[in-house]
Image (cartoon, rainbow, N blue to C red):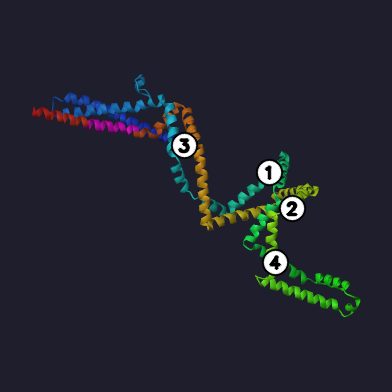
Amino acid sequence: MGEQLSRDAERARALWRVKLAATLLLVATGVLFVVARHFEPVHWIWGYVAAFAAAATVGGLADWYAIVALFRRPLGLPIPHTAIVPRNHHRIAENLGEFIETNFLAPEPVEARLREVDFAALVADWLNDRERSASLAGFILRLVPQALSAVDQSGLKGFLGQRAMAELQRIELAPLAAGLLSAVTEKGRHQKLLDELLVALEKVLANEETLAAMREKIRQELPALFNLYRADAYLLRKIVASTTAFIRDARADKSHPLRQEFDSFVTGFIVRLRTSSAFARRAETLKRDLLARPEIAAMAEGAWDSVRSFLEQDSRSADSQVRRQLEAMLVDVGSQLARDPAIRAEINRGMVRVLADFVQSQKSGVGRFIADQVKSWDIDVLIGRIELTVGRDLQYIRFNGAIIGGLAGLALHALEQGLKLHL
């Protein structure tokens, strides 16, 4: 603010100096005209000087009048079509708002200007700075206790719980499960699940405790005579070896009959989910029974309490796990944005569309705001600001008017003298 006042004071002093110089020039041309007229009988050259001075004085006066008439009445006289800016204050405001709305906020220039900005790169650069990401993570974490308290006190938790329960009740479980399974099987991802199951089964068969339990079960089923010859151990080895070999074959062979059977099972299950009304009814019944169980509500309440307690304690900790993870996530997002031009381009296109649509939806309000602001300005303050901004250039028009007028007067006087010589 102080710097602005200092600049305004300097502009005011510069404007005063230019006004003074233009006024002194006008006085000087007037005095020169009087002197030239006085000495005109002495020598013919004074006639040219008088013509120049007279025209320069008239040009300077005309330009002074024109400049003053823009802002106020010359000499306070009620001359028509003067004080143009004060008399048209509201019209200027309306036209200015309309001009900015029509030209500056038109779709083409707005979108062109927005396309020049790489929003995604700005975000990436900002997030790549670990200190900034840490500050943002800390700021978010400081809001967590307040947000959790607001959720508990406002009844939002109950409302969200009711809405979630209502949405779950509305969801048809069978089609949803069919869609999810179809997505899983589309690229053979269910075979990876089978691989994981086979690996887990192989580990189970290699576990000593599991083998001991299996041997005990075999011993109980075999006649006592066979146990004397340790048939249980022999059978266990054969079972484990055969099963392990079968598992390894299935894992190695992508066209193994087990895989084909698994494909058939999954495909048939998806078909039943989509087409069987009985299956759908059983699924809906199961869903309703589960959602109606008090244990589900208690589990959800307990989960919320646990999450809230953890977040509240973690947010107060000097070594917050959430803050570290959030900071790392923000930095990672920035790094990924910096490395992926395709994502940046997509983000930028989205930002241009969103911001351009927002500007178009709000531009009439912007134009009206500008018009109302200009209307609300004190007219004397407005004129003062305009004069400080362009006043010096306007005063230089007076210099130009005097010089151009003087030269025009000199040319006309020379033409007049030339015509007299030829007549």
Q: Amino acid at mark 2?
A: Ala
Q: Is residue 67 above or below residue 114?
A: above
The residue under label 4 is: 261
Query: Could you tell me residue 420's position as x and y percent?
Result: 11, 27
Q: Is residue 331 above or below residue 385?
A: below
Labels 1 & 4 near each other (Cβ < 8 A): no
- Residues drawn in magenta: 394-407
Chain-order first, disc 2 or disc 3: 3
Helix, strand or loop at label 2? It is: helix
Checking the image for residue 4, the label placed there is 3
Query: Could you tell me residue 228's position as x and y percent?
Result: 89, 79
Q: Marks 3/1: CA distance? A: 42 Å
Checking the image for residue 147, the label placed there is 1
Q: Amino acid at mark 1?
A: Ala
Between 417 and 238, the residue placed more toward the observer is: 238
Residue sitting at the far right: 224
Q: Marks 2/3: CA distance? A: 80 Å
Checking the image for residue 278, the label placed there is 2
Chain-order first, disc 1 or disc 4: 1
Check disc 3: other Cα within 10 Å, few if <14, some if 14-19, many if 20+.
Answer: few
Q: Nearer the viewer, mark 3 or mark 1?
A: 1
Chain-order first, disc 2 or disc 4: 4
Residue visible at 52% across and 52% down?
A: 346
Between 316 and 143, the residue placed more toward the observer is: 143
Q: Is residue 132 above or below residue 19?
A: below
Chain-order first, disc 3 or disc 4: 3
Helix, strand or loop at label 3? It is: helix
Query: Could you tell me residue 153's position as x and y percent?
Result: 73, 39
Q: Marks 1/4: CA distance? A: 51 Å
Between 305 and 138, the residue placed more toward the observer is: 305
Q: Is residue 16 above or below residue 237?
A: above
